[in-house]
Image (cartoon, rainbow, N blue to C red):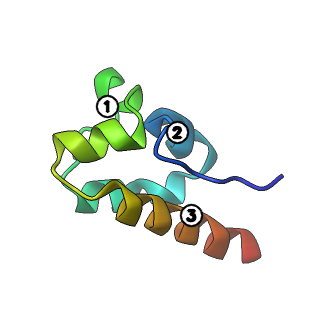
Amino acid sequence: MATVITKDTVVGDILDIAPETAPAFLDIGMHCLGCPASRNETVEEACMVHDQPVEELVERLNDIIKANRKN
């Protein structure tokens, strides 16, 4: 099953299926990954809160998942 992250994907869902993406969230300043509020945000909402471009994070998340699925 291929996993494709979009701006509407929920952060908690991403972390559940691809925990290796956590550093990408930490890099944008999202240090409360275990907090229920942050886990229920979409990628777009997280980027808005942390003043980050959503397209760049979506691309990075998909690249991380793709790279880890090859291994």
> How many angstroms separate mark 1 from mark 2 (CA)?
12 Å
Mark positioned earlier in the residue sequence (1 or 3) = 1
Q: Which residue is drawn at 41% across and 35% down?
A: 42
State which quadrant residue 60 falls in: bottom left
Question: Which mark is nearer the camera, 1 or 2?
Answer: 2
Position of residue 69 measured from the top left corner of the image (x, y, whole percent): 72, 68
Position of residue 24 measured from the top left corner of the image (x, y, whole percent): 36, 61
> Which residue is labeled 2 in the image?
9
For badge 2, the amino acid type reads Thr
Residue closer to the observer: 48 or 23: 48
Residue 20 is left or right of residue 68, and the answer is left
For badge 1, the amino acid type reads Ser
Residue 26 is left or right of residue 64, and the answer is left
Tag 3's secondary structure? helix
10 Å neighbourhood of mark 2: few (<14), some, or many (≥20)?
Answer: some
Quadrant for the C terminus in the image: bottom right
> Which residue is labeled 1 in the image?
38
> Which residue is labeled 3 in the image?
62
- Residue 33 appears in the picture as rendered: no
Q: Are marks 2 and 3 in contact (CB under 8 Å)?
A: no
